[in-house]
Structure formats: structure tokens, C-alpha cells
């Protein structure tokens, strides 16, 4: 029975999804479209040249294995690269490079030929204007050195570093960074600009918010100085525009930005954009602009995981030359988990309270500060939660803890759970025993005493119990 290209690719995706992270799968495999199956040759369509290069560099072995598994040892993979149809419709009017396509066998270098790629001369060049001083509007403290990398931002940061070293000379043009509030989009955008400013002093760099760009354009219209406005922006080498979603429903601003974008892109200048959503979800933005936002790389920034949040806080403390105990850092990282900005705000509030009230920074003060900043942050400690944490720590299933087995590892986990349940909950001894297979209160008393005694004589056992207590402290 002949397989369809869709069924072959669906099977490939199923296998791939089990070998890569969910974020990598969404970023690098969901956008691929299967377009043809010629015997043992699978043809897939990828969104851009950079996309193809990334697949070949990072996932070629995985792709080869899954395709051979589906189509046999002679299987080959071919790529097709096409551009947005909107670009084709506009290329004559805009005089932009038209669509490019490539079809390559696995492992061969791609060959892209541009048709009618005639260079347009800049009619706004003024002799000597490159020597003028421009305030880049960059925040000097926002650099790559203090931008912590994690799985949540790895792609975005790597692309940022790449274009910083070669602005306008990579496939990441434009680079569009998107994500929720306080996840580091603006920091990363400034870091790109600061790196270029430091290492390529001849480059003209400008950071501008979409709101400021709009207001400047309105002033230019009022003053009759639109040519000066256009001239200024077309001479920028690295243009960073923050929060482009605020261009929504501003027709004339979008039009002037459209032509500015076209000129900079064709001139090999670097464009960096930030947004709170991916281009496809932008509302009130003209399709011709949305099409251009997709030309380069679109990279999302997600909420950092627990370990990354700890690293961010430690980096912040190190830069301020402040020493805070690890359990306080973990407590803040655990509870303030919506975005980096709020987390750093909690840390600043903690240090301010400590300084003004001359209080030591400890877990108690951290709990007070975080409670005032985060609604509903406290998690009710229950016997079930304690059982879960102890079971995970010692790798003992809950059913064993509740059962009758007398295996030493299980007995130890059961007794520690009873001890912590008595310490952290207001449950009666009878109720605690009920959660452990209906044991009576005397068993709970014996367990608590046994744990206390062993902690006095066994350092390793004591460390285990203290570690569990720290985990529970972080949870409340």
C-alpha cells in the first residue's frame, strides 16, 4: 500500500516529538509542511533559509533516522524554501528582492538565486551626515553578560549574539522577539545594541519604542519635516523598535515604518523588533508589514524555569555585592514565577526592608515581602503534599507508604512523613495515622520519636530530613 506524504510526515513527527523538547518541537518541526513524496524522497517546505540551516546543523541525524525508518535505507530528504505570497504581490511596487526558492539534497549546500535584485540608491544621503552624533537611547546595563540563558530564551539569545557580531549579515533580519511582560525582550534587544556599539563604533544604532516612533512622526507631519524624519531613520545601521504591537490601527505610522523597513532591509541594515505576541496574532497591523516581520527569525521568550530564576537572582545579588542565604533565594524564585521583572522587584523590596528596618534578611522576612507582592502565593501544606515530597525524595511509591511492607527504605520514608506531618500541619495524631493506611496514634508517636532520635545520631539522615524541610519551607 502506497503511503501518502501526509501520513509519512505525521509518523515522522510522532517519533521526533519523543526525542526533542516540546519547545523545540513547536519551534522547528510544527512549521514544516510536507509537499511531496517521490519514491523514497520526502520533500518538505521550510519557512526560511535560516530554518533550513538550523535543521541541518542541529537535527540532521534525527531527521535521517526517522525518514529511513519510514521509507527505508535509501530514503532522502529534500527541502523547499518559499517566501510569503504577499511578498510576491508587492515586490514590483516595493522594489524588494523577489521570492527565492531552493531545493537541495540532504547534506549539500543550498543555492539561492535572487532575480531582479537591483540595488536602489538612497536618495537621502547627505555628505558628512554619517559623522553626526546620535544618542542610541540604549540602557548601558542591559548586556549579554547579565542576561541569564536558559531553555526559555536559548534560541533568542543565541540569535541575538549572532547578529551582534555581524549586524545585517545573517539570516536573522529582522529578529523579532516576542513574549509576555517582564520576560527579557527589552533587555535582550538593548544587549544586541550595546554589543554592536562597543565593537563596531562606526555603526549608527538606535533604540526606540513604537510609541516614540509614532509621536516623532506626528511631530514631523505637524512641522512639515517628513523628509528629515525619513532621512534620519534610513541612515540607521541597527534599528531596534520595542513593542511593535502598539503600531496597531495607526495607518500612516505603519505606512512610513513599512517604507523605512524596506529601505533598511534592502540596504543590509539590521532590524530588531519586540512584540508581546507572534506576528500571526497581531491585530490592527497591515498584512504587508506582518509579512515582513516573518522574513527573518521569530523567537519567543518563555517564563524561566525554577533553576533559571535562581540563576537570575544570584547574578543580580552578585552584581550588587550582596550575600543572601540560598533558602531565601529559592523561596523567592519558587513563589514569584510569573516574570523576571516581578521577581527582581521582590528582591529589591526585600533588600529595602532589611536596610530601612535594620532587619536580617531571612526566610521570615522573605515570606512577609513576597506575601505582600503575590496574591494567593501560599500553598496549604497538607499531609498529601508531605507524602508526595518524601516519596519523590526517597523514590518510594505512595501505596507502599500506606501499605504494610516493613522494608527498611519504606519504613524510613513513612516515619519521616509522619514526623513532618506533625511538624507542619495541625492534624491530630489519629488523622495523621489515618493517612498512612489507618495506623493508630501510638504508631505516629513512635515514628516521630524514632526520627528525632536518629537525627541526633545520624548526620546523613539529619541532612535528608533538613533538605525535605527546606523543600516544604519553600512551598509555603
Image (cartoon, rainbow, N blue to C red):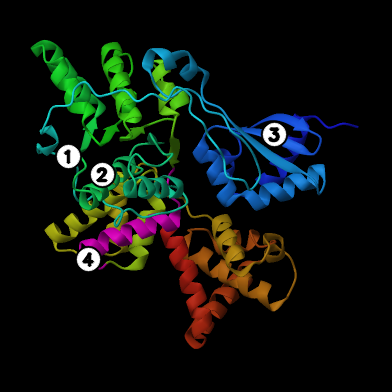
Name the residue tied to disc 1: 136
Q: Which of the two marks, 2 or 3, is nearer to us in this view? A: 3
Observer-nearest residue: 73 or 385? 73
In the rendered structure, which disc, 4 or 2, sits on the residue that comes first in sequence? 2
Image quarter (top left, top right, bottom left or bottom right) of the C terminus: bottom left
Tell me the chief SS of the magenta region.
helix
In the rendered structure, which disc, 2 or 3, sits on the residue that comes first in sequence? 3
Rendering quarter of residue 77: top right
Q: Give the residue at the far right of this rendering.
A: 1
The CA span between labels 2 and 3 is: 39 Å
Give the left or right position of residue 422, taking residue 195 as reference. Answer: right
Rendering quarter of residue 359: bottom left
Observer-nearest residue: 289 or 91? 91
Query: Which numbered circle lies on residue 322?
Result: 4
Dot 1 surroundings within 10 Å: few (below 14), some, or many (20 or more)?
A: some
Give the structural element (helix, strand or loop) at label 2.
Answer: helix
Q: Give the residue at the far bottom of this rendering.
A: 457
Amino acid at each position: 500500500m502506497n503511503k501518502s506524504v501526509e501520513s509519512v510526515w505525521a509518523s515522522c513527527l510522532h517519533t521526533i516529538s519523543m526525542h526533542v523538547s516540546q519547545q523545540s518541537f513547536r519551534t522547528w518541526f510544527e512549521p514544516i509542511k510536507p509537499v511531496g513524496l517521490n519514491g523514497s524522497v520526502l520533500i518538505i517546505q521550510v519557512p526560511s533559509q535560516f530554518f533550513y540551516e538550523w535543521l541541518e546543523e542541529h537535527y540532521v541525524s534525527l531527521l535521517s533516522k526517522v525518514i529511513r525508518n519510514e521509507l527505508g535505507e535509501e530514503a532522502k530528504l529534500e527541502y523547499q524554501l518559499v517566501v510569503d505570497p504577499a511578498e510576491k504581490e508587492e515586490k514590483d511596487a516595493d522594489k524588494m528582492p523577489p521570492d527565492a526558492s531552493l531545493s537541495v539534497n540532504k547534506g549539500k549546500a543550498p543555492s539561492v538565486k535572487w532575480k531582479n535584485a537591483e540595488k536602489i540608491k538612497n536618495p537621502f544621503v547627505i555628505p558628512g551626515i554619517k559623522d553626526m552624533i546620535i544618542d542610541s537611547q540604549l540602557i548601558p546595563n542591559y548586556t549579554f553578560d547579565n542576561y541569564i540563558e536558559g531553555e526559555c530564551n536559548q534560541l533568542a539569545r543565541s540569535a541575538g549574539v549572532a547578529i551582534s557580531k555581524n549586524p545585517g549579515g545573517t539570516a536573522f533580519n529582522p529578529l523579532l522577539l516576542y513574549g509576555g511582560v517582564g520576560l527579557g525582550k527589552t533587555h535582550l534587544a538593548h544587549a544586541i545594541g550595546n554589543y554592536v556599539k562597543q565593537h563596531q563604533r562606526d555603526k549608527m544604532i538606535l533604540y526606540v519604542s513604537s510609541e516614540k516612533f509614532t509621536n516623532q512622526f506626528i511631530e514631523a507631519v505637524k512641522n512639515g519635516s517628513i523628509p528629515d524624519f525619513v532621512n534620519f531613520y534610513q541612515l540607521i545601521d541597527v534599528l531596534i523598535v520595542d513593542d511593535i504591537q502598539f503600531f496597531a490601527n495607526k495607518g500612516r505610522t505603519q505606512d512610513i515604518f513599512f517604507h523605512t523597513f524596506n529601505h533598511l532591509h534592502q540596504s543590509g541594515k539590521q532590524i530588531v523588533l519586540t512584540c508581546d505576541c507572534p506576528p500571526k496574532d497581531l491585530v490592527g497591523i497591515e498584512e504587508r508589514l506582518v509579512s515582513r516581520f516573518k522574513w527573518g527569525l521569530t523567537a519567543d521568550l518563555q517564563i524561566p524555569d525554577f533553576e533559571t530564576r535562581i540563576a537570575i537572582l544570584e547574578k543580580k545579588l552578585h552584581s550588587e555585592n550582596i550575600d543572601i542565604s540560598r533558602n531565601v533565594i529559592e523561596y523567592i524564585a519558587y513563589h514569584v514565577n510569573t516574570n523576571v521583572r516581578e521577581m527582581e522587584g521582590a528582591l529589591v523590596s526585600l533588600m529595602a526592608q532589611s536596610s530601612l528596618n535594620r532587619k536580617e534578611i531571612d526566610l521570615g522576612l522573605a515570606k512577609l515581602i513576597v506575601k505582600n507582592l503575590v496574591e494567593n502565593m501560599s500553598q496549604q501544606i497538607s499531609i498529601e503534599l508531605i507524602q508526595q515530597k518524601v516519596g519523590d525524595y526517597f523514590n518510594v511509591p505512595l501505596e507502599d507508604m500506606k501499605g504494610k511492607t516493613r522494608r527498611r527504605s519504606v519504613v524510613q520514608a513513612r516515619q519521616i512523613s509522619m514526623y513532618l506531618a506533625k511538624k507542619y500541619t495541625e492534624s491530630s495524631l489519629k488523622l495523621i495515622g489515618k493517612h498512612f493506611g489507618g495506623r493508630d496514634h501510638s504508631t505516629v508517636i513512635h515514628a516521630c520519636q524514632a526520627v528525632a532520635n536518629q537525627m541526633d545520631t545520624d548526620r546523613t539522615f539529619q541532612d535528608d530530613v533538613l533538605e525535605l524541610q527546606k523543600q516544604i519551607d519553600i512551598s509555603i
